[in-house]
C-alpha cells in the first residue's frame, strides 16, 4: 500500500469532517473525497509527497473552494437565465416587470464582480440562506469576518446598482467610479 493510500485510509473520516466546513451535501463531500484520493495518488506517481496528510487536506480544501465557486457561478447564471423566462404580458405593469428584470440582471452582475471570498460568503447568506455563524463555521473564519464581507458585499452591490441606474439615465451627470477593495 502506498503512503498516500495509507494516509488517506487513516484520515478519511477527518477529511469528510473537514469538508463539512465547505459543503453541506453528503454526496458532494463523498465526490470530493474520491477526487482527493485520485489526485493525490496520481501526484504520488510523479514524485514523493513529503507531507501526505497536509497534501490531502490542501487538495480537499482547493477542490471544495472550486466547487463552491462553480456553484455560485451556476446560481448567478441560473438567475440570469430565469430573467429571460419571465413571461411579459401586455398590462399596465409591463414597465415595472421590465424594471424588475433589469434590476435582477444588474444585481447578478454586481455579485459576479465581488472578490471570491466576499462573493462566496455573500452567496452562502443570500442564496443558500445560511446564518452568519454557520458560514463562519463552514469556512473557518471569524463571525466578524463574515459580517465584514457581507457588509462590504452589500455596499458594493448597492453602489453598483446606483451607478448603473445613473449611467443608464441620460439626464444624470457626474457618475462616480466605484471600485471594490480587495477583502482579505
Image (cartoon, rainbow, N blue to C red):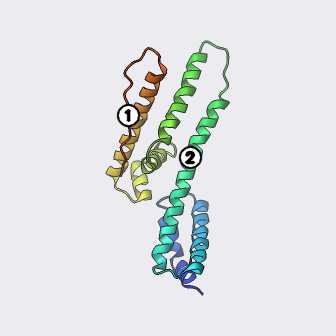
Q: Residue 36: give its label.
A: none
Residue 122: x %, y % from top left? 45, 44
Q: Farthest residue toward the top?
A: 92
Quadrant holding the N terminus: bottom right
Sequence-wise first label, 1 or 2: 2
Residue 159 versus residue 89 in the image, above or below: below
Residue 81, image quadrant: top right
Residue 44, image quadrant: bottom right
Q: Residue at x 55, y 32 (%)?
A: 105
Q: Residue at x 60, y 36 (%)?
A: 80
Residue 155 in view here: yes
Distance of label 1 from label 2 (alpha carbons): 23 Å
Residue 27 versus residue 37 in the image, above or below: above
Q: Residue at x 61, y 12 (%)?
A: 92
Q: Residues within 10 Å of mark 2 (few under 14, many from 20)?
A: some
Q: Residue 178: give its label.
A: 1
Q: In the depicted view, which residue is nearer to us: 164 or 146?
A: 164
Q: Residue at x 51, y 77 (%)?
A: 11
Q: Residue 73: give its label.
A: 2
Q: Farthest residue toward the bottom?
A: 1
Residue 150 versus residue 135 in the image, above or below: above
Residue 123: x %, y % from top left? 49, 45
Q: Residues within 10 Å of mark 1 (few under 14, many from 20)?
A: few
Closer to the observer: label 1 or label 2? 1
Q: Under tag 1, what secondary structure?
A: loop
Residue 23 in view here: no
Q: Are marks 1 and 2 in contact (CB under 8 Å)?
A: no
Residue 13: x %, y % from top left? 52, 73
Q: Horizontally, is 116 left or right of 25 in the view?
A: left
Amino acid at each position: 500500500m502506498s503512503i498516500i493510500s495509507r494516509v488517506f485510509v487513516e484520515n478519511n473520516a477527518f477529511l469528510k469532517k473537514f469538508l463539512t466546513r465547505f459543503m453541506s451535501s453528503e454526496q458532494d463531500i463523498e465526490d470530493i473525497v474520491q477526487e482527493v484520493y485520485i489526485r493525490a495518488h496520481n501526484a504520488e506517481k510523479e514524485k514523493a509527497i513529503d507531507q501526505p496528510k497536509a497534501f490531502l487536506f490542501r487538495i480537499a480544501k482547493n477542490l471544495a473552494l472550486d466547487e463552491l465557486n462553480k456553484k455560485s457561478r451556476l446560481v448567478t447564471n441560473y438567475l440570469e437565465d430565469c430573467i429571460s423566462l419571465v413571461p411579459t404580458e401586455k398590462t399596465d405593469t409591463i414597465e415595472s416587470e421590465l424594471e424588475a428584470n433589469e434590476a435582477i440582471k444588474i444585481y447578478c452582475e454586481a455579485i459576479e464582480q465581488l472578490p471570491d471570498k466576499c462573493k462566496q460568503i455573500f452567496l452562502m447568506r443570500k442564496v443558500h440562506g445560511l446564518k452568519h455563524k454557520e458560514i463562519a463555521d463552514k469556512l473557518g473564519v471569524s463571525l466578524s469576518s463574515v459580517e465584514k464581507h457581507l457588509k462590504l458585499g452589500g455596499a458594493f452591490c448597492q453602489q453598483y446598482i446606483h451607478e448603473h441606474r445613473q449611467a443608464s439615465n441620460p439626464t444624470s451627470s457626474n457618475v462616480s467610479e466605484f471600485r471594490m477593495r480587495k477583502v482579505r
